[in-house]
Image: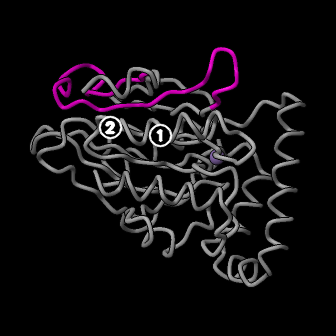
Amino acid sequence: MSTPPPLPQTVPCVQAQQHWQCVDFISDLHLDAHEPTTFDAWVQYMASTTADALFILGDLFEVWVGDDNQDPFARQCIATLKATAQRMPVYFMCGNRDFLVGHELLNTTGMHGLSDPSLLELGSAGDATRILLSHGDALCLDDHNYQAFRAQVRQPQWQADFLAQALTERQAYARSVRDQSEALKRSHTDYADVDHPAAIAWLQRTHAQVLLHGHTHKPAMHDLGHGLSRWVLSDWHADSQPPRLEVTRWLRQNAQSPTRGLCRLPLSAASRLS
Ligand SMILES: [Mn+2]
């Protein structure tokens, strides 16, 4: 068994507001100017979701080369995030594609930054559900090459050096990342999955009942035993057959159900139900 990655001394906790009846979780949209159908579906969702709060758990963008990039596609994304953040609290956690999202984007859009992992406490006091939110890549322990890469690019010095490069250089890097990602998809390589003992260790350390993450593109609900579960968010791809467009939603009215109020919803239903 591999050792789970250490948790920070204190894991920040978001307390759900009393009036939140409905909370949405999305991740792995991999928004890209070359995928306009997925982008359009996202814009429509952002304008119409009936949620009271939205949690974006990483890889919203296929790649993010720095907050100073103001190309037309980035500007459209910023406008969409800003409009939604004016309607409801929007929380943003970085993934492995958009780990260079910084304070400037958060400030411009009005989103709240979330460190990975973070806790969310939902429901009434005494009977609350504690959800541990993560992008999920840190727990994919079997992918040793990726974990080495992750350790490198999460270093403040590596990020400062990268951001010091000219925007054109960073954009060239982004294109190479996209090409590598396309090649990987064509090779049908199976991605590493989250390590269950590590997931259980994280949940027990943080006294949480549910781990909610994305990254693996394997949407599911796994029963981990011990009263613990692991919910995996869907990636988004409007052009696949059938389209992969899904939201995971918490509804206060179902908080006592076996799933603790969580459910997976096709995007078409997410803007009608409340
Ligand atoms: Mn990812």
Q: Which residues are magenta?
A: 237-265
259 with respect to 55 (left or right): left
Quarter occupied by residue 109: bottom left
- Going by the numbered disc 1, the residue's amino acid type is Ile
- Point out residue 133 in the picture as x, y percentages from the top left corner: 42, 48
- Point out residue 222 in the picture as x, y percentages from the top left corner: 48, 24
- Going by the numbered disc 2, the residue's amino acid type is Gln
Say few, some or many: other residues with alpha carbon within 10 Å of mark 2 (under 14 / 14 to 19 / 20 or more): many
- Point out residue 28 in the picture as x, y percentages from the top left corner: 59, 42
Instruction: Tell me the SS state at disc 2.
Output: loop
Cβ of disc 2 within 8 Å of ligand 1? no
Q: Tell me the mark number nearer the camera, choosing from 2 and 1.
A: 1
- Point out residue 89 in the picture as x, y percentages from the top left corner: 30, 54
Q: Nearer the viewer, residue 177 or 131?
A: 177
Quarter occupied by residue 187: top right
Magenta stretch contains residue 241: yes
What is the count of numbered marks?
A: 2
- Is label 2 in contact with label 1 (beta carbons under 8 Å)? no
Image position of 13 with respect to 237: above or below: below
Q: Look at mark 1 in the image and give the residue it sits on.
A: 26
Q: Look at mark 2 in the image and give the residue it sits on.
A: 209
Residue found at x 72% / y 55%: 147
Q: Which mark is residue 65?
A: none
Image position of 65 with respect to 254: above or below: below
Magenta stretch contains residue 179: no
